[in-house]
Image (spheres, rainbow, N blue to C red):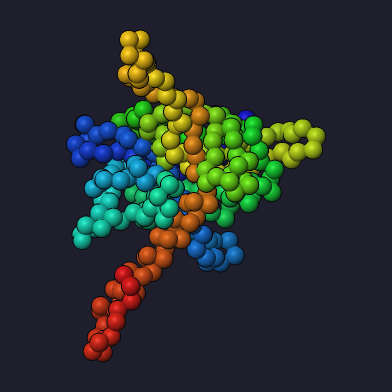
Amino acid sequence: MALLPPFMLDAVTAIGVGDDAAKRVWVGTGFLYGHFDKKLDETTKSYNVFLVTNKHVLKGKKRIYLKFNSANDPTSKDYPVDLLSRNGKERWVGHSQPSVDVAVMPINANALKEELMKYAFFQSDAHVSSISAMKALGVTEGARVFVLGFPMGLVDKVRQYVICRSGCLARVRDLLEGLTKDFMVDATVFPGNSGGPVVLQPEIAAITGTTAITKADLIGVVKSYVPYHDVAVSQQTGTPRVIFEENSGLAAVEPVDHITETIALALKRQKNRLAYTKWKSKKQALGAQPPAP
């Protein structure tokens, strides 16, 4: 019995760098997120599709590659994505708070559809649980989660298969009470997992006084593992000489709310750019001021 909806596996993509396909290195994880736009009719909705990952995965890079599987044969294709526009500005948008490690970038999902690639996206109005939703569900420490991604760059050259690991919420009440901006899961992640989705695992039963979680919802994006530091001290001088870093088995996660906030910022900037472009294309009165780009 599967507890993870199969479409969620197709929503996740590996993020690579290097124009030479033979030497390409897979450095992170991203996933497609559909921000609800409007209802087209009684059964159809439209979404603005974004790539979601971490700021630190994209920072300082000019181009990345996203891998998607073919829907018709056992192959995959690496799509180049330029991160800088012609004027040198970043095409992706990071959360406004420096401590929040979330980045989004618009993705043309129609291009994937036209090339018959296998893809999906998390729908903001159907497949996510915000902080307030987690409160309403009674989510607390011990709730099971799935962590999806590509640890240590484990990406097959022929076909992309995301790695799923299970864990549980290690500490979340401080987030729900507004005391912190992120939460922790007990799930071992490694470099390459950064930017991957964290999904609630549905439960068959719950103890008396609690409510069973019956739906797999996106609740956040992996930020990093929480390191453990140990210090080697010189026996002769008593001073620290070497610092060792180990993976504690805990991971820090940004909540879905930070994805929503970042997308709102991206849409605002997009609107301003469109307004600026329209202004430039029209003949303005002398001294007229353009809208802010």
The residue that appears at 76% across and 38% down in the rendered structure is 210
* Corner quadrant of residue 219: top right
Given residues 11 and 55, the one toward you in this image is 55
Q: Does residue 271 show up? A: yes
Q: Residue furthest front?
A: 237
Given residues 75 and 249, the one toward you in this image is 249
- x and y, in percent, of residue 61 in the image: 26, 45
User: In this image, 211 relative to 232: left or right?
Assistant: right
Q: Residue furthest top?
A: 235
Given residues 10 and 83, the one toward you in this image is 83
* Corner quadrant of residue 161: top left
User: In this image, 4 relative to 104: left or right?
Assistant: right
User: In this image, 170 relative to 86: left or right?
Assistant: right
- x and y, in percent, of residue 194 in the image: 41, 37
- x and y, in percent, of residue 3 in the image: 60, 34
Q: Is residue 201 above or below residue 217?
A: above
